[in-house]
Amino acid sequence: MSEQKIPYKIYLSENEIPKQWYNLRADMKIKPAPLLNPGTGKPLTAEEMSGIFCEELVQQELDNDTPFVDIPQEIQDFYKMYRPAPLVRAYCLEKALGTPAKIYYKFEGNNTSGSHKLNSAIAQAYYAKKQGLKGVTTETGAGQWGTALSMACAYLGLDCKVYMVKVSYEQKPFRREVMRTYGADVTPSPSTTTEVGKRILAEHPGTTGSLGCAISEAVEVAVTNPGYRYVLGSVLNQVLLHQSIIGLETKTALDKYNITPDVIIGCAGGGSNLGGLIAPFMGEKLRGEKDYRIIAVEPASCPSFTRGKFAYDFCDTGMICPLAKMYTLGSSFIPSANHAGGLRFHGMSSTLSQLYHDGYMEATSVEQTSVFEAAEQFARTEGILPAPESSHAIRVAIDEALKCKETGEEKTILFGLTGTGYFDLVAYQKFNDGEMTDYIPTDEDLKAGFEALPKVPGQD
């Protein structure tokens, strides 16, 4: 098909929105290691997990074998408010770069939350409502997940308690106010409202917080208040399942025009966007049907894939959550306050960690000044102000396109544009004023986190 027939934006019809989520684990030869009870060291049972998570979500979390899961009609109806999301050909960026590469991006910012997070937020809130719960608790880093969950809970009439990483709470007051507009109770973390928060503050006076801290607080509130359960915006298998709608839509749109990507790029913090985008493509790779080069991009200031250890670790700083086998910097690791975006989690999805460990994808880390350079170049050419998280993927997509310029290769590059950056203008201001700097943790900085990894039989 000639290039002229490929539109700037490829939209699916409402009827083409996926009716099922895809469970990538069903095609994995080596399954992700199970979550462990930190007290017994044994795999968590469904009964143990149901005290923290909604019952239906527990089943999704534990299901390694069912390839497709039906999306309830109520969730399908909600999706239609903002889906299908467009797949965009970045013609203007290609021209500016002078590259023979063809660049596509899946844009997930066409909703009030400004990101892909709403895909799982509505699902988790739906199952909480179906179970008859009063409300849910959660953490949020950059604020996109908290905003999305606040929207979903408002739609379904659920109470929503959000613990927001303190540095983001202070830097992004308007993101906080969107959550409050949707009825959420938002608390900066670590706080004095929980026992674990008090302990973290005592051990780390003046800390700016981390996702690990906020998770600990949210879990404590969930398990100590009847009628509440904890929900998470990334990392967990259930979240990657819900986010697979991103990749499923993307593949359907590409297939319409017989387009096959050579390189697929996603930003990586806990894994929700990356796992969702690559799901059907990775499935083909696992089944031996096609091959793709898949690149996870993370911040150099929080490099769990590229400098972490593949080991069992706590998912939270307070060490009250289950143990997950993942690439981790240690649950006590707190990113520098200089780090301006999300992607602040000390670990990575167990599913993605296993795939990376088995060699099915690559990972790279990038420094934040180069990320914001790419963000501004993208904004000036493509007309969208990207979220800092998304801009990690933009950085590497541009780098790959420039390599094609050097070699003359006409590769097709696909990346995930997870959302917009209109609540991240403090970071953009620091970049434009020349006040933004790069921070890369030293080996000594990481050593303490590695030394504190829990002792699990068979783990070095």
Image (spheres, rainbow, N blue to C red):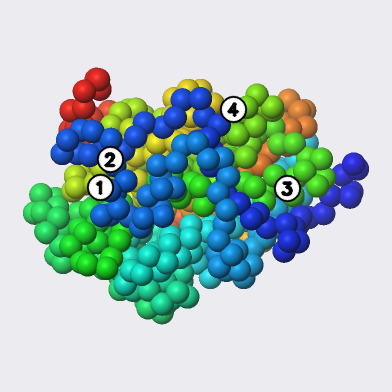
Query: Considering only order in the chain, which callout, 2 or 4, is on the residue closer to the N terminus?
Result: 2
Residue closer to the observer: 134 or 306: 134
- Name which residue type carries label 4: Leu
**Residue assigned mark 4:** 286
| On screen, residue 133 above or below 40 | below
Disc 4 or 1, which lies upstream in sequence?
Answer: 1
In the displayed structure, does residue 7 sit left or right of residue 416?
right
Q: Answer yes or no: do the residues labelled 3 and 4 have beta carbons within 8 Å?
A: no
What's the mark number on residue 252? 3
Report how far apart the C-alphas of labels 1 and 3 lie in the structure: 38 Å
Contact between labelled residues 3 and 2, with CB atoms less than 8 Å apart: no
Q: Check whether the beta carbons of the residues at disc 2 and disc 1 lie within 8 A of each other.
A: yes
Closer to the observer: label 4 or label 2? 2
- First in sequence: mark 3 vs mark 4: 3
| Type of amino acid under label 2 | Leu
Callout 3: SS: helix
Residue to which mark 1 is pinned: 48
**Can residue 296 be seen here?**
no
In the rendered image, which quarter is residue 429 located in? bottom left
Crowding at label 1, few (<14), some or many (≥20) Cα neighbours within 10 Å? few
Write down the residue under mark 2.
Answer: 44
Quadrant of the drawing holding the N terminus: top right
Compute the Cα span from label 4 to label 2: 27 Å
